[in-house]
Amino acid sequence: MSLDPATVRRIARLARIRVEDAAVPRLQGELNNILGWIEQLSEVDVEGVAPLTGGAQIALRMRGDAVTDGGYPERILANAPDRAGEFFAVPKVVE
């Protein structure tokens, strides 16, 4: 499917986007590229694949609710530009 300039202007008007006449050819090319990707997706064989409307249908694995410090403070603090003991040191921002 290929969009003509009139259709691009109509899409822009419906989306309430002001498009200058000089930008219509570039926008036309970009929209045609997007439609090309959509056409490629429609060629994918999805026979036997159940539709998924959201992540709520997937059962998530539960983990223990335990407070930890991560177990490797030295590795984390190695990235700090400045540190004070086992804490990040930051410059004072409020006087």
Image (tube, rainbow, N blue to C red):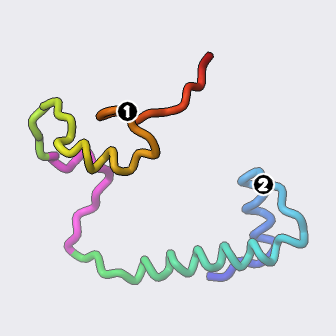
Where residue 8 sits in the image (x, y, percent)? 76, 69
Q: Is residue 23 above or below residue 62?
A: below
Q: Nearer the viewer, mark 2 or mark 1?
A: 1
Q: Does the magenta-highlighted stretch encompass residue 58?
A: yes
Q: Is residue 39 above or below residue 24?
A: below
Decide if residue 93 is on the left or right side of residue 86.
Answer: right
Crowding at label 1, few (<14), some or many (≥20) Cα neighbours within 10 Å? few
- Total residue callouts: 2
Q: Does the magenta-highlighted stretch encompass residue 78?
A: no
Q: Can you name the residue that lies furthest to the front here?
A: 85
N-terminal of the two: label 2 or label 1?
A: 2
Where residue 79 sits in the image (x, y, percent)? 38, 50
Which residue is rendered at x = 39% and y = 37% of the image?
A: 83
Mark 2 = which residue? Answer: 17
Which residue is rendered at x = 20% and y = 41% of the image?
A: 70
Q: Can you name the residue that lies furthest to the right here?
A: 21
Mark 1 = which residue? Answer: 84
Which residue is rendered at x = 21% and y = 48% of the image?
A: 57
Decide if residue 81 is on the left or right side of residue 85.
Answer: right
User: Which residue type does callout 2 highlight?
Assistant: Ile
State whether the magenta stretch is mostly helix, strand or loop.
loop
Query: Magenta segment range?
Result: 48-60
